[in-house]
Amino acid sequence: MKIQQIDVYALRLQRHYRVSGHAETPGRLPGTDYYIEPNWVHAYSSVLESCVVKVTADDGSVGWGEVQAPLTPQTPCALITTLLGPALLGHNALATSAAYDRLYHLMLARGHNGSFLLDAMAGLDIALWDLKGRHYGAPLFELLGGPYRIELPAYVSGLRFKTLAEKVAGARQFCQAGFAGIKLFAGASLETVETEVREVRAAIGPQAFFAVDAICKYNLADAIHLGRTLDELHASWLEAPLNAEDVEGHAALARAIATPIAVGETLRTPRQFEPWLRNRALAIAQPDIMRTGITGALRIAAVADAMHVPTTLHTGVCTGIGMAATWQLAAALPGEIPQEHQQDLFEAVGAVLKTPLVQRNGRLIVPQQPGIGVEVNEDAVAAMSTEHWIVDTKGRRCVGGLPSVFFKQP
């Protein structure tokens, strides 16, 4: 069974991620939908963007994958259509590890071993695993060793409300609905954040899952101060508290506080995780399969396990395709850490699926159909796309969307 065709879509959904709970977009970058978040230094989008991939084999079998592309989805589209896709044509569609290694080495000697290149690889890798599962008539978790659970306990990621009162009420409601707990985004002053974490923890009770994601906001001294407050509250973890490149700083923080440090969404390979694990700079590994692929995440989890560090999957901006694939791998990972869940986006991102994902009483019900377990609504995907490219032996061509138009003027 050989890979015959690859379709790539740049998606755009009118849905704001609202990381700070606001609808405004201050610091707008001219001529784009991108802006600088007031509490952080990173760019975000006022619409939901992603890159979706379909791989077709010569027997007609297909598989779907997704690239983590909250900004500039046209970038992985270009990488797939000009390099990665052509490199896969004619390759054994079931040889997922061999395909991953082939793509990884295409640009390694030139120093390209991360960022958009690995993200684009991840989408193709997920699609090949989906195709493999469909070929063997088994859900992905069965191919990965069988499930530890098929109903995932979950925590709600972010309290996307503007006021503290709204955050407290929202956290309480999520826990009452059956979710294991919540993760609070922290980017304001330490005084403000300390008040928020105490109020939210009091609202959900001492037994609920409670994590804080600082999104690389603080320096070491401030992170230690926040971490010691979280120690008092018996927090589940402090996520990404420092600069994303600061391994030694995270290691120093880990030695200074009792709360576990969680890191991983910016890392894409086992080699990138190794210094963090070696220096005990993290206690929870958080790969995102839409940046690592299924193959990469499995390898990362194996390296982490050898260092006695648990793995739980990060889930950010994505459609129901990436969400379904994440649930499949999460079902096959050991441990009882709740799965990150984007409740605010859940209904909207299901628009790309014919068979919606199901959550029940705060638990994520892992689909048991073959592959990633869902049927993709290709018409809906095409309707949401600003670009649709096809790569096959005839070359690379745009068959839908407006490839020169990525943004609307504000």
Image (spheres, rainbow, N blue to C red):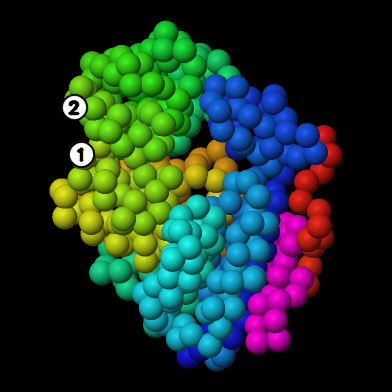
Quadrant where the image shows the C terminus: top right
Identify the magenta region: 375-398
Residue 93 rendering spot, x and y as whole percentages: 47, 83
Image quarter of residue 229: top left
Report the residue marked by disc 1.
280
Of labels 2 and 1, earlier in sequence is 2
**Residue occupying the point 73% across, 39% down:** 33
| Neighbour tally class for label 2: few under 14, some 14-19, many 20 plus, Cα within 10 Å | some
Mark 1 Cα-neighbour bin, 10 Å: few <14, some 14–19, many ≥20: some
Q: Residue 255 carries which label?
A: 2
Q: Is residue 272 visible?
A: yes
Q: Which residue lies furthest to the top in this view?
A: 191
| Quarter residue 201 falls in | top left
Q: Do the residues labelled 2 and 1 touch (CB within 8 Å)?
A: yes
Which residue sits at x=45%, y=25%? Answer: 217
Q: In the image, residue 379 lies at what x, y percent?
A: 72, 67
Residue 76 lies, in percent from the top left, at: 60, 59
Residue name at image x 36 percent, y 74 percent: 97
As displayed, is residue 27 above or below residue 358? above
Front-most of residues 397 and 209: 397
Residue type at mark 2? Arg
